[in-house]
Structures are given as C-alpha cells and as structure tokens.
C-alpha cells in the first residue's frame, strides 16, 4: 500500500494493531524471556504493545533497514525494566548466530512482505537457535465490508494479487504467508499455535479507514488497470463501511 512504511501511516495504524493482536498467545510463551529481537520494527509499535505484557528485565533489539524509523523505535520504548538497542540492516539476513542469546524473535506485519525462501531461512535460523517466534498481523486475504458493494470482490482479488507481486525478482507471499509459515515451522519441528487477529475499521476510525481504503483500491488498480474505481472509492469514502481485514498471529515454540 502507498505509504506503507511511513511514520505517519505506522502511527495511524498502531491503535488498530494493538486491538487486533492475539494477547492470549503471550501467555503461552516459555519463560524466562530476557532478550527480544523485533524484526522490521518500524516505529516500534509491537514493542510498546508487548513489553508491558512480559516480565522484566527485558532487552529489546530493534531491527530495521530504515534508519529514521529505527531511531524513532529505539527512542520511544520507555517501559520500566526495559532496555533497547537498534540494529540497522536487512532482517532477511538473520542467522542462528545472531540469535545466540535471544529469548524471542518477533515481528508485526512482516511475513507477507517476504518470499518463500526468506521465510524458510528465518524459520531455519529460529530452529537452529531453538528460539520461539511470535509473528503478529500477517495479512490473510480476508476482507469483508458492511454494507457490501458488487465491486468489493474484484478489488479484493486484485489487491491480493498485488500482494503476491514480484519485486526486484522476489515473489512476495502476500496473503499466503501465514499458511506457508505454519508449514515451515512445523516441518522444522516447532509446535505452532495461530489466532485470528483481524483489524476492525469503520466510522469509529475514520482517518485510518479512509487511508486504508485509498491504499487498498490504489494497489488493486495498480495490479489491474482495467478497474474503474473512482466512483467506487468515492462511494466508500463518502459513507465509510464497517470493515474487517483478516490477519493471523502465529506462535512457534521449539522443544
């Protein structure tokens, strides 16, 4: 989506992310966990949500390839008993050696941006280090709107194909990511638990809902230029629907 990694977009979606995440999975994490590595941390919203739910002391390693977002993330995690450091770089280069002293690998809204090979490598690193993984808010390709419009399904299908597009020779998993990651972790010997973590959008979140609708329709039109969506988008923005955007949270534990 347009603006997907901007500070303003990430800030706009943070409350919806927090409401959507499956908090019960946190209670299934093995203890003790002291070092948490957050992959593709963005502004650090996952840390702000998860750190207060874990025992202290904690040390967070925030990893991202955007130095501006990384600076924001490391300077905005202020929880008693929690320390934080930044790790600038590509999270797809993670190795088992990087996880030697790590108690948990986590991420938010990341898996759908990876390829099959990148998920396999990430799973292999976690398996070799025996580190549990909590991966939240992976897009699952399920969007419902109330009231529905006839164009909804065509837009959704085009958007899903856009999520699976090839970028610099990399075919993204998009909405196939949650199911693929489950199989990869299970094949590597992990016990996997998943939970639905849908976004709930609508008139109660007008700014986020409108921005999401613009991005959703824009990506669909980029994928299928034959879609004439001006009137559709004007209708949706003029009377915001209640929207459910499907995501999946995944917890994988080794041993």
Image (cartoon, grey):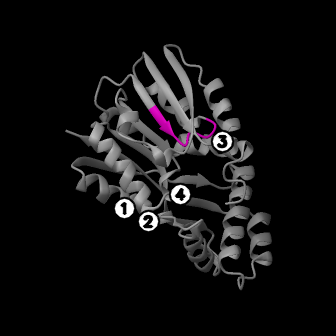
Q: Earlier in the sequence, mark 1 or mark 3?
A: 3
- Please name which of the two marks, 1 or 3, marks the residue nearer to the observer: 3
Q: Which one is nearer the viewer's eye here, 214 or 64?
A: 64
Q: Which residue is mark 1?
A: 179
- Decide: marks 2, 3 in contact (CB < 8 A)? no
Circle 4 SS class? helix
Question: Is residue 240 in view from this perspective?
Answer: no
Circle 3 SS class? loop
Q: Is residue 54 above or below residue 15?
A: above
Q: Earlier in the sequence, mark 4 or mark 3?
A: 3
Find residue 176 and name its label.
Answer: 2
Magenta range: 37-43
Residue 208 is left or right of residue 198, and the answer is right
- Decide: marks 2, 1 in contact (CB < 8 A)? yes
Q: Position of residue 173 (x, y in %)?
A: 47, 64
Residue 179 is left or right of residue 147, and the answer is left
Q: Which residue is mark 3?
A: 66
Determine the CA span between mark 1 and mark 3: 28 Å
- Please name which of the two marks, 2 or 3, marks the residue nearer to the observer: 3
């Amino acid at each position: 989506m347009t603006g997907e990694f901007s500070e303003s977009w990430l800030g706009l979606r943070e409350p919806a992310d927090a409401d959507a995440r499956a908090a019960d999975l946190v209670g299934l994490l093995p203890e003790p966990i002291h070092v948490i590595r957050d992959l593709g941390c963005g502004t650090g919203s996952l840390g702000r949500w998860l750190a207060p739910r874990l025992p202290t002391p904690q040390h967070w390693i925030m990893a991202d390839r955007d130095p501006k977002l990384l600076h924001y993330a490391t300077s905005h995690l202020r929880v008693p008993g929690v320390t934080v450091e930044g790790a600038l770089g590509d999270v797809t280069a993670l190795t088992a050696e990087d996880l030697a002293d790590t108690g948990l690998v986590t991420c938010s809204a990341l898996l759908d941006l990876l390829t099959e090979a990148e998920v396999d490598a990430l799973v292999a690193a976690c398996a070799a280090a025996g580190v549990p993984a909590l991966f939240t808010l992976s897009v699952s390709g399920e969007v419902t709107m109330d009231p529905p419009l006839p164009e909804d399904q065509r837009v959704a299908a085009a958007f899903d194909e856009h999520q699976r597009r090839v970028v610099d020779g990399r075919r993204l998993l998009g909405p196939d990511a949650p199911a693929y990651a489950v199989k990869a972790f299970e094949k590597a010997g992990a016990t996997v638990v998943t939970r639905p973590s849908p976004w709930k959008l609508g008139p109660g979140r007008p700014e986020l809902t409108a921005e999401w609708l613009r991005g959703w329709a824009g990506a669909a039109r980029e994928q299928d230029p034959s879609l004439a969506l001006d009137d559709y988008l004007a209708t949706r923005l003029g009377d915001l629907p209640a929207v459910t955007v499907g995501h999946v949270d995944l917890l994988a534990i080794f041993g």
